[in-house]
């Protein structure tokens, strides 16, 4: 077989394979049928950190001390000792709450329990899983191999690896429903929502929380609204407050496929430290590319098959010509 024929045959076979293959991105996952979550309304948060203390109590985690002061929690960010933290946005003189300019606002950081979680998608051993019914994203330390890939798959920088421990594992909020805690499966609510005195952290079904969030956005700024506390489906109490000028969308309704923990704010979300995200989940994109890459791995085999057939045909033709001449 001539070299030119060899290249023609190779390209022909590869082209045929390419034509039959295209980048197939799977769609975002839909919210779980009985998805539960939380709504954090920054305009209701007074920065008391009762949610941080309760989270540590529920999860058996120590406070983060400052110097010799060990009776309060000084956690400034998520860590292997802190699954839920309250951060502060400040601008200029920080004179007025929930104002972008010369104002301040409180922001909660914890696992967002993504509808289509990147951490679950990238974990090679399924140590992180999404509950098919409630959508809660859980972590199994017994399965985890400590590769930390989940840290790269999370758009919110949530999974925290315990570098101080020789057998360090990942730490993240499991919506108070892990083995030994099981508040949600027993009909309860998350510790942070239970402890929150203002209803800034509200528990409930994702559907009801989303409807509540949209209701608040549609209210007229300046009117008085009765804000629920605890579980939005059976509030422990209500309290009246003047409605602020909310940002016009609910963070987590659609971002990166949506989240079960959603946020409301008067200050723009990017100023509150939220990452720039489109509506496609990272998991749907990366799994689409992955499946395409794997299908492209078939190319060499297909090209080799084409070549073998052409070589066989040419060899047969050559033998036939030889026989005819003799
Ligand atoms: S916020 Fe991060 S850790 Fe939590 S479910 Fe989403 S991807 Fe996973
Ligand atoms: S749901 Fe539980 S673990 Fe998660 S932040 Fe709230 S109290 Fe902490
Ligand atoms: S308990 Fe409620 S009001 Fe207090 S810091 Fe946490 S979210 Fe804010």
Image: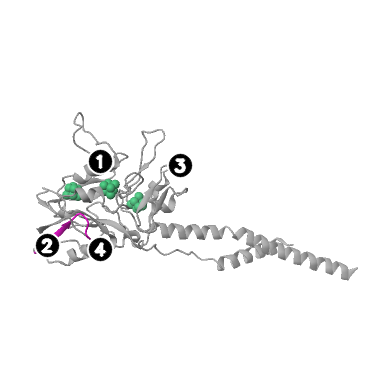
Q: In the rendered image, which residue does mark 2 sit on?
A: 225
- Mark identifier at residue 208: 4
- Secondary structure beneath dot 4 equals helix
Give me the C-alpha separation between circle 2 and circle 4.
17 Å
In which image quadrant can residue 101 be found? Answer: bottom left
Q: Is residue 228 magenta?
A: yes
Sequence order check: which comes first, mark 1 or mark 4? 1
User: Compared with residue 41, is residue 218 higher up or lower down, i.e. above or below?
Assistant: below
What is the number of callouts on the image? 4
Q: Is mark 3 within 8 Å of ligand 1?
A: no
- Mark identifier at residue 145: 3
Residue drawn at the location 79% of the way across and 68% of the way down: 317
In which image quadrant can residue 145 be found? Answer: top left
Give me the C-alpha separation between circle 3 and circle 1.
27 Å
Q: Is residue 24 magenta?
A: no
Q: In the rendered image, which residue does mark 1 sit on?
A: 57
Residue 27 pos. (x, y %): 41, 65
Q: Residues within 10 Å of mark 2 (few under 14, many from 20)?
A: some
The span shown in magenta is 223-233
Residue 100 pos. (x, y %): 16, 55
Give me the C-alpha separation between circle 2 and circle 3.
49 Å
């Amino acid at each position: 077989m001539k070299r030119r024929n060899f290249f023609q045959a190779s390209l022909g076979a590869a082209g045929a394979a390419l034509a039959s293959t295209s980048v197939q991105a799977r769609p975002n996952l839909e919210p779980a049928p009985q998805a539960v979550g939380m709504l954090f309304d920054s305009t209701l948060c007074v920065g008391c950190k009762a949610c941080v203390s309760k989270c540590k109590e529920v999860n058996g985690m120590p406070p983060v001390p400052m110097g010799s002061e060990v009776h309060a929690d000084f956690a400034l960010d998520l860590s292997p000792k802190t699954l839920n933290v309250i951060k502060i946005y400040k601008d200029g003189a920080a004179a007025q709450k929930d104002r972008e300019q010369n104002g301040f606002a409180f922001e909660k950081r914890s696992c967002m329990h993504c509808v289509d979680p990147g951490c679950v998608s990238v974990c090679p051993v399924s140590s992180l899983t999404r509950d098919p019914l409630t959508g809660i994203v859980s972590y199994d330390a017994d399965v985890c191999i400590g590769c930390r890939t989940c840290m790269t798959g999370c758009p919110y920088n949530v999974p925290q690896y315990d570098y101080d421990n020789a057998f360090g594992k990942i730490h993240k909020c499991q919506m108070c429903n892990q083995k030994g805690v099981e508040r949600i499966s027993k009909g309860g609510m998350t510790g942070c929502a239970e402890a929150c005195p203002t209803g800034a952290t509200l528990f409930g079904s994702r559907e009801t929380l989303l409807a509540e969030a949209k209701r608040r956005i549609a209210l007229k700024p300046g009117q008085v609204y009765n804000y629920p506390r605890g579980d939005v489906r059976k509030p422990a109490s209500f309290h009246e407050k003047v409605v602020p000028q909310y940002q016009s969308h609910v963070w987590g309704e659609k971002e990166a496929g949506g989240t079960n923990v959603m946020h409301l704010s008067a200050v723009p979300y990017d100023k509150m430290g939220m990452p720039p995200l489109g509506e496609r989940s990272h998991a749907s994109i990366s799994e689409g590319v992955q499946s395409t890459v794997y299908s492209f791995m078939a190319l060499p085999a297909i090209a080799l098959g084409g070549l073998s057939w052409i070589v066989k045909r040419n060899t047969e033709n050559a033998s036939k010509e030889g026989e005819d001449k003799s």
